[in-house]
Amino acid sequence: MAEVFNWQLGREMQYPFQAERPQRQIAWVFDTNKCIACQTCTVACKSTWTSGTGQEYMLWNNVETKPYGFFPQGWDVQLLDRLGVVQWDGQTYEGQTVFESAPTGERVNGWLPMAEDWAHPNVGEDEPAGAVERGTYIDRLPHDTWFSYLARICNHCTYPACVAACPRQAIYKRPEDGIVLVDQARCRGYQECVAACPYKKVMYNNETRVSEKCIACFPKIEQGYQPQCVTTCIGRIRIASFISKPDEVDPKKPIDFLVKVRKVALPLYPQAGTEPNVYYIPPIHAPREYLHQMFGPGVDEAVETYQNIKNDPELLGLMMLFGSTERIMHSFSVEGEIATGFDEQGEELVSVPLREPTFIREFFDDVHQAYLHNIT
Amino acid sequence: MTRDAGTPEAGTPDAGTDRTPAQVDRRGFLKVAGAVAASTAVATGIAARVLTRPEPATHVVARRHEGDIPADHQHRAWARAQAWVVPLLVQNLVAPHAPALVIPELRVRALHNGERIALLVEWADDAEDAVDSMARFRDAVAVQLPVDTATTPGVTMGAVNQPVHIMQWRAAWQRDVDRGRQGVREAFPNSFRDAAPEDLMGEEAAQQFYPALVANNPMARRDRTSPVEDLSAVGFGSLTAQDKQTATGRGVFDRGWHVVLSTPLAAGEHKTSLHPGLTTSIAFAVWDGGAGNRGSRKQWSNWTDLELEA
């Protein structure tokens, strides 16, 4: 075991080998508050990459309803069960990661889902956390009765459990962009990676007998474009760009701004210890206890910052740039009422207004003698 | 033993019993033979025959065989080769470990005909695990030889500058050979699909839907003709398929596996070259798919001697 620094845990941690950070790391931010679980991302990914025989069940991208939705069945419950009660001291994780808690003879504290665990990709859809009483009226945050959507892809972790678990180094993390790939020529189908990944985003191909995973649409990223799941999102909840190393921060970079400056986007189950590179703006209507368990100690600050967005033109401008261009936005600026995104050379990609023109109707419609649900 | 120990056949290895020569208690054997000698008039000759019985094997001896070596494990040629019992250990040297020793030993016989050498490897197993799919693993066995027959490389699947030649047989590959390429349809017989890519656009164009196939990964082969794969290794985790595949074999399940693995004595570059009269090293590994064995989760043996009868 080697000592590596995991900034999301605020400490050094044990990892099976001395992993070097990539020269660049691709990262994502998903705003869960805007997701409507339309599964357009899921379908875009599926039709692009996994329509072959043997890939039938594979969803490299999926959207599940929390708290009762999972793909595969119970993946995060299994993870939480293995790691025990989450223990944070401020920003420092006091508990053990999937590497540190690995039993003797194992590289990672993992579990291998059975075929039936993958058989119900949208189980629990739209199921609220509790019973809805007759006449329930939700007038406060967080909601007493709630569910929320969680869109998931491979986290292209800085310290991937799949890489650690493979006994024959058939999985690698690309130094040029941090994308984690299964070498399709070298894999011998042991499924150790499937068992190891805490997010269960490596999947076994039943026809070719090797494991496969989300490839971050690397042919697009290499050409300067964002992945399919990002560019097809009709709710414009996603952005993909590069994140700086832990000791660096560039407020002009969209991901740095969201993750390190405003700290509005948080890693999913950081306690696993893999340093995932998909960051989530937590659902503000879900109970805080649940969010703390899911996104770590930054939840309160993230929710507060997000709720104050109308007074934060930079954050608002950047959120408006989500989904406004297929190209990778390397930097952005907000001037007046206009937010602009730039490519790697600093050329303008797109400009958007901070506020869309809005017409507000009267709450009561005199013509039809009725109150209106939607007045904007 | 079900037969009278005094009968002449009892002097040959394993006759009338599942026990192997190594398991035969030699002193008990002589005691029974002695009792027979004392009580019957013809016993003297029989006892003498027992006493001149060959020493139990101390290593694997490949007996010379005239003509083609039978792939059928029930062929009587195999009965003439003495069985050597290989004790197995659970692999717990490198993670991930096998959790338990589920196959404690193998029985190995060997024959050569001057052109090829074949090993009959047998072990008891309750269930035939021959399907490769999600969280399901296949039974398998592997034979390991040093590429330089004068050396005994590390038990760690060789080492740098100590390459080993490995031949692995997998039950799933046997099924591919016996019944045609096995895939989703066989692993999930009740699954529904409208059309496979190859049905829509032909084999060639459909390859793009099978990434490992395009990458020439032997796991994904759709035209498998041998259930045995030639590999090389220079240490744990370095196992790589050989460019030229020359090993063949056949495995049959009958209350356990009976697997014949065969390779040319002159197998070619990066492989082990053998010749009659040579003594070198050999080692084994076996996997019980039903117990979750795969990769490093296996039973393995230390090196033992392999002698090719001159």
Image (cartoon, grey):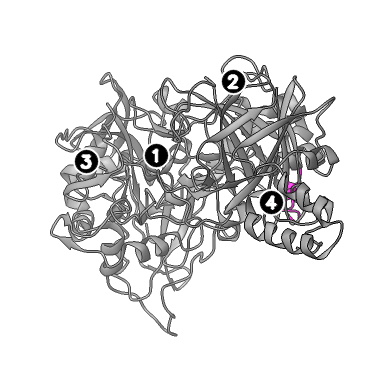
Question: Which label is found at residue A4?
Answer: 3
Q: Is label 4 in contact with label 3 (beta carbons under 8 Å)?
A: no
Report which quarter residue A134 is drawn in: bottom left
Q: Position of residue A161 (x, y in %)?
A: 37, 45
| Residue B234 or residue A363, whichever sits in front | B234
Q: Which residue is mark 4?
A: B20
Q: Chain of mark 3?
A: A
**Amino acid type assigned to the residue bearing label 3 in the image:** Val
**Amino acid type assigned to the residue bearing label 4 in the image:** Thr
Q: Secondary structure at mark 2?
A: loop
Mark 1 to mark 2: distance in Å? 30 Å
Residue B208 seen in the current view: no
Q: Is label 3 in contact with label 1 (beta carbons under 8 Å)?
A: no
**Is the residue marked by circle 2 packed among few (<14), some (14-19), or many (20+) residues within 10 Å?**
many
**Is the residue marked by circle 3 packed among few (<14), some (14-19), or many (20+) residues within 10 Å?**
some
Tell me the magenta residue range. Answer: B185-195
Q: Which residue is mark 1?
A: A163
Q: Which residue is mark 2?
A: B271
**Amino acid type assigned to the residue bearing label 2 in the image:** Lys
Q: Are marks 4 and 3 on the same chain?
A: no
Quadrant occupied by the N terminus of chain B: bottom right
Q: Are marks 3 and 2 on the same chain?
A: no
Name the dominant secondary structure of the magenta segment. loop
